[in-house]
Image: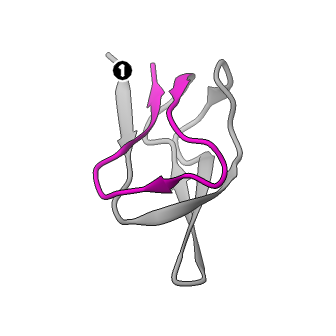
Amino acid sequence: MADEIRAEMVANVWKVVASTGDTVSEGDTLVILESMKMEIPVLAESDGVVQQLAVNEGDVVQDGDLIAVIG
């Protein structure tokens, strides 16, 4: 069962930390978003392998947009 990580707010993708194929643990930072001059880490919600990263640095995400898939 794949775990979809979605944006919880409108924000800019400031930094992509993880890569497709990386093994991650629950709580690892995948991406750092920037909104209103605040940095917001997007964390893995489960252990697994990053199957897809749907964002690139500089992208703008909307509430509910797919950021990553962990399987």
Of helix, strand and loop, which one carries label 1?
loop
User: At x 28% / y 50%, what residue is drawn?
Assistant: 64
Q: In the image, is residue 54 part of the stretch drawn in magenta?
A: yes
Residue drawn at 43 percent across, 42 percent down: 45
Q: Which residues are magenta?
A: 51-71
Q: Which residue is mark 1?
A: 2
Farthest residue, direction left: 64
Q: Is residue 43 above or below residue 37?
A: above
Place residue 10 in its image quadrant: bottom left
67 or 46, which lies in front? 67
* Residue 61 among magenta residues: yes
Say above or below: 23 vs 18. Answer: above
Towards the viewer: 40 or 62: 62
Q: Amino acid at mark 1?
A: Ala
Q: Is residue 18 above or below residue 16?
A: above
Residue positioned 66% across, 18% down in the render: 21
x and y percentages locating residue 11 in the rendered image = 47, 65
Residue 19, given in percent of the width and then of the height, sits at: 69, 30
| Quadrant of image for the N terminus | top left
